[in-house]
Amino acid sequence: MKAWEKNIRKVVPYVPGEQPKKANIIKLNTNENPYPPAPGVVEALKNIDTDLLRRYPDPAASKLVNAIAEFHGLDSSQVFVGVGSDDVLAMAFLTCFNSKKPILFPDITYSFYDVWADLLRIPYEKQPLDEQFRINGKDYQKENGGIVFPNPNAPTGVLKPLEEIEEIIQNNLDVIVIVDEAYIDFGGTSALPLLEKYDNLLIAQTFSKSRSMAGMRVGYLLGNPELIRYINDCKYSFNSYTMNQTAIALGVEAIRDRAYFEECTQKIIDTREWAKKEFASLGFSFEDSMSNFVFVTHKDYPAAEIFEALREADIYVRHFKSPERISNYLRITIGTREEMETLFAFLKQYMSK
């Protein structure tokens, strides 16, 4: 080891899904929306005042914050925005998890949580999901320094009922509870109504999935004004200008078009429910996903082999080699009906050999 290395902060990084550089592929590996952004987003992009690009953006991203607040029926003081939900969640970790007690999150979940905890030197304990990949609320009734979990969970897609989420919050009023709702728009009930009752609740959402804006990187937190102010204080001490001019302008248009948002999410939900029947007919097993993906396994065909065969056919899905418990599963994003029909045509041919 070099002398200077002893002071280097070292972590095992998060590994994002593959972003193939090839054309004419079917990309079902990173839970992107298969449909374009709202029409207003396209128009806003055409009309961007390029003179603004030489100026710093509004550090408070007020137009975007106000639009998000209006959509959810909240006050602007209850909204924090950032560069995708990864950014806002990382800032929430930095601000809220500052105890010597361990934070708690599921053992099978979004794999960025332990990366942030390691990076920020936050102690943590993983709580095991049950055999149906469900969170056991009793595991979160012990002493801790905070709680975070997705709903629906990722990569399983399993949804936790709102009453069970409230029970976890009720049992942890002395710490911050973060509910990561990146996929809530595909069939779940948001914890938004609980904000009025619990000042220790933070809800994270994103434009990347249901609003077709993964390439623009827009995420946000919802919480009580005091908590949002604390997070903003940390943000301004870290990077005052997290949101660029283009992301703010396009984000405003994306959140305003409720009709288009509902139309696209419903198309994905309808395709997902049809896809579940197709997966079942081919012998795949899976829990009832309420997200824009399905987490499947097959008793006769190893996931790693299916993954490679699909990849050779330019159909990309996600295979997690660890933890061992999910190494025989594939997470398959719901694409357009046509993309999914191509996927199933390949699987039927593959399994007929």
Image (cartoon, rainbow, N blue to C red):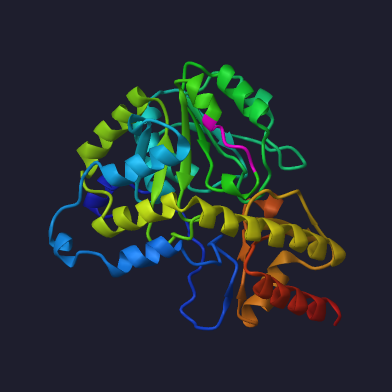
The total of numbered circles placed on residues is 0
For image coordinates 16% across by 60% down, the residue present is 52
In the image as oriented, which residue stretches furthest toward the front? Answer: 259
* Magenta stretch: includes residue 4: no
Q: Quadrant of the C terminus?
A: bottom right
Residue 284: where, in percent of width, then height?
Answer: 81, 61
Using the image as rendered, state which of residue 154 and residue 227 is in the foreground. 227
Question: Of helix, strand and loop, which mostly describes the magenta segment?
Answer: loop
Residue 327 appearing in the image: no
82 displayed left or right of 299: left
Q: What stretch is highlighted in magenta?
A: 188-192
39 displayed left or right of 105: left
For image coordinates 45% across by 34% down, the residue present is 73
Residue 78: where, in percent of width, then height?
Answer: 37, 31
Asked where in the image residue 333 lies, by quadrant, the reply is bottom right
Asked where in the image residue 29 lies, by quadrant, the reply is bottom right
Residue 205: where, in percent of width, then height?
Answer: 47, 44
Q: Quadrant of the N terminus?
A: bottom left
Q: Is residue 235 above or below residue 197?
A: below
Residue 8 appearing in the image: yes
200 displayed left or right of 34: left
Q: In this view, does 225 lie above or below 35?
A: above
For image coordinates 40% across by 25% down, the residue present is 224
Residue 91: where, in percent of width, then height?
Answer: 35, 39
